[in-house]
Amino acid sequence: MKKFFSLVMAAVFLLTFSFGASAQTKSAQTKNDLTSSQAIKLALIARQHYWDTMNGHIQKVKNSKCSSKTFIYKGTEYRYFCSELDTKEKLVKYLNEIFTLNAINKGIKKYRFIEYHGKLAQPNADSGSLLEWNKAKAKLIYQRKDIRLYEFTVPYGNPVKYEKRKVTFVKVRNKWQINAFDAVR
């Protein structure tokens, strides 16, 4: 009888440990997974970082020093970034909070940011967007271990129209980042 009782207790112990471990693993996976609502939050952060960069100034920074100086370089008028983004190191550090390094490097090339007299500058152009990312809906359309592709439906205009945008998220050092600098402009 003692052997039977020992076997039953061992089985109960193993089942309890097994269920506990699988619940813990599932909880950890859910914690590191990217939900639609988290994807929308990250898209909003990325949008802010994108527009801060395109404006040459981080809106949250107070007492920033901005030069309104412009100059002509190879036939294009450029303007300097404000002090918080005026070097490539500062810009990359800021953008890497939400974008992959690959996305940042491609964005710097695409938008023709340059260092001129030791400061970062960009072509002098105004731009904007009517897309209302704060009202966007996200749908997961593809996933692999460390990659998620979401399709966002973003409203704009009056009467309301919708634009669809696909945004790729990549997990880098256990953190989800967007893999295209202008994916959420």
Image (cartoon, helix red, strand yellow):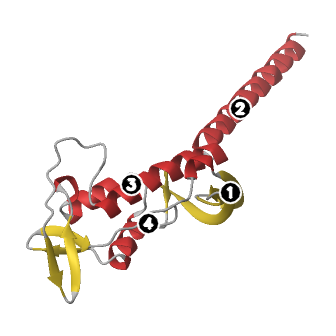
- Kind of residue at badge 4: Phe
The disc label shown at residue 49, or none: 3
Compare marks 4 and 3 and give the one earlier in the sequence: 3
Taking the view exactly as shown, the residue that stands out farthest to the left is 117
Q: Residues within 10 Å of mark 3 (few under 14, many from 20)?
A: many
2 or 1: mark nearer the eye: 1
Which of the pair 161/106 is nearer the observer? 161
Of labels 4 and 2, earlier in sequence is 2
| Distance from Cα at disc 2 to Cα at disc 1 | 44 Å
Query: Who is closer to the viewer here, 80 or 107?
Result: 80
Q: Which residue is mark 2?
A: 23
Task: Name the residue located 31 percent from the left edge and 60 percent from the top edge.
Answer: 55
Q: What's the CA distance linking mark 2 and mark 3?
A: 37 Å
Mark 3 residue type: His
Counting residues from the start of the chain, the first of labels 1 and 4 encountered is 1
Contact check, label 1 and label 3, Cβ < 8 Å: no
Residue at image point 74% right, 31% down? 18
Residue at horizontal 17 percent and vertical 73 percent from the top: 115
| Residue 25 to residue 33: above or below | above
Q: CA distance from mark 1 to mark 4?
A: 26 Å
| For residue 13, above or below residue 61 | above
Q: Which mark is residue 17?
A: none
How many other residues sit within 10 Å of disc 2, few (<14), some (14-19) or many (≥20)? few
Please tell me the numbered disc located at residue 181.
Answer: 4
Q: CA distance from mark 1 to mark 3?
A: 26 Å
Pointer 1 residue? 160
